[in-house]
Each structure stands twice: as C-alpha cells, then as structure tokens.
Image (spheres, rainbow, N blue to C red):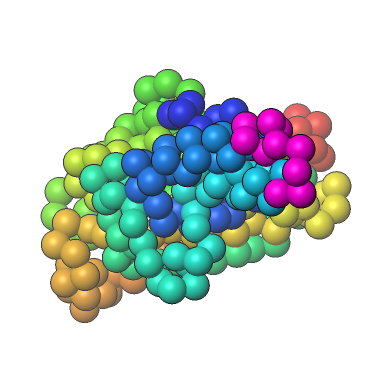
Amino acid sequence: MSTTFQPVRKLVGRSFSRLQMNLGLTERLGSILAGGALITAGLLNRRMSRALLLGAGAGFLVRGATGHCPLYDRLGIDHLDKRERDGVPGNRGLKIEYAVEVQCPAPELYQFWRNIEQLPRILRHVETVEPVDAWHSHWVARGPLGPALEWDAEIINEHENELIAWQSVHGASLQNAGSVRFEAFSDSATYVKVCIELQPVGGTAAIALARLFGTDPQRELEEDLERFKDFAERELTPSSHSVE
C-alpha cells in the first residue's frame, strides 16, 4: 500500500475511509503542496488574514490526503485517473450488498475474514485463496459459464474488528472491489454487511447471460452470508470453543 499520503491521512482520521476519491494523483499532490505553502504563509503572517491562510491550507491538505473534493462531488465531476485505479474502473460494475445479524463477537468474525485462506469454507464460488503477503492474495473461483477464473487482490483499507476493504489488482480476469463491515451490537452480537462490485469478463452482457441461465450474484451473496451466519454461530462463538 502506498505511503505517499500516510502522514496527512493520520491527521484526517477514520473519516478518510468513507470519502469517495474523485481527484487524480497530480491534483492530490498539488493540493498538498498548496496546503503546505498556505499554512507556512499563515504561520509567518501576523495579520488578520492568518486564520484565513491556515484554514485554506488545512482544507487543501485534507483534499490532497483524501483525494476527495466536496465541490467535485456535488457537481458530479470525477478527475480520478482510471489508469491508477484497480478494482472496477469507473464504478461501472454490478453492485450487490447484503447484511446479517450474527450472534457472535465482532473480533471473532473479523479474524475469520482476515484469515482469507478460510473464505472458501463459506463462499461457494471461491475454490482457493492463497495469501501472498499481509495485504495481497491470489484467488481462484469457478466461472458461471466456463473454466475457473484467477486474479490477485489487495487489501486497501482496514480497521481492526470493524472493516476490511479490498480490490482486484490490475489485469484481473474478474475485476472486483468490496468491503465487509462488522458493527458490534453488543459483546455477543454483530451486524455484518458485505458490499461487492463486480465486472466479469464480457461486462454487463456476461452478467445478463449468467442470470438467464439461473446464476444470480445477489442471491449467491445472500446465501453465502446466511451460511456464514450459521457457521459462525456454530463454530466461532466463545461457547463453541469450550465444547470438546
């Protein structure tokens, strides 16, 4: 994962992960440089304009660190250079999501998903997931109308016991991106929500053809998460660990 914007990201905090990027790399770097220059000018300026310079500088730093411009967002402008972005280019894929309430502590559920080699146990279409390093992995899944598909993926955002977000890397045969969130209701109950964006080989036409033959990604996700709920409440709860 790139560390170019890490120092400023820490100043922004967790809200960084909830902002949709709409700036390219050049514009982000320019914003950070402009922000630094304005803050420097503000610190050296003892006049009434000092607060204005500091405020504007902070705004540019946040803009550069998050890659998000609120004005662009309101106007529907997206300057993100698609060549820099993996996952699903331009958010043009099929978006599916589903959530379940699981009677199991959030840390237990998070650890299961973070140990990604275990995911084929609950995701029917996934055959194997092999970790490459702490952030990257290699996936093999059954194609709906053809041979198995393979791709590499990377974790792009993570908050322990709360969130794991990923995307496929450049050149993947199945372009995808998504996230799984763990919202603790109590010490023993967790709301688990999975959001996925898919763009199979052949684009939307392939999705329509797959549905025509009875394969529905939304239904598959729902069934997978219901299966995960049953598995987690049976195998991952603290009480299940004590049963011999």
Drawn side of residue 205 relative to residue 119, left or right: left
* Nearer to me, 166 or 41: 41
Query: Is residue 4 magenta-colored?
Result: no
* Quadrant occupied by the N terminus: top left
Is residue 163 in view from this perspective?
Answer: no
* Nearer to me, 124 or 139: 139
The residue at the far right in this view is 187
The residue at the far front in this view is 47
Chain part drawn in magenta = 40-49
Residue 50: name its quadrant.
top right
Q: Position of residue 35 (x, y in %)?
A: 55, 40
Q: Position of residue 163 (x, y in %)?
A: 61, 45
Residue at screen point 55% across, 35% down: 37
Query: Is residue 44 magenta-colored?
Result: yes
Drawn side of residue 208 relative to residue 193, left or right: left
The residue at the far top in this view is 133
Drawn side of residue 231 relative to residue 141, left or right: right
Tag count in the figure?
0
Residue at screen point 23% across, 58% down: 200
Q: Position of residue 183 (x, y in %)?
A: 72, 54
Work out whether 73 lies above or below 39: below
Residue at screen point 45% across, 65% down: 72
Q: Position of residue 162 (x, y in %)?
A: 67, 45
Is residue 78 in view from this perspective?
Answer: yes
Residue at screen point 46% across, 28% down: 4
* Quadrant occupied by the C terminus: top right
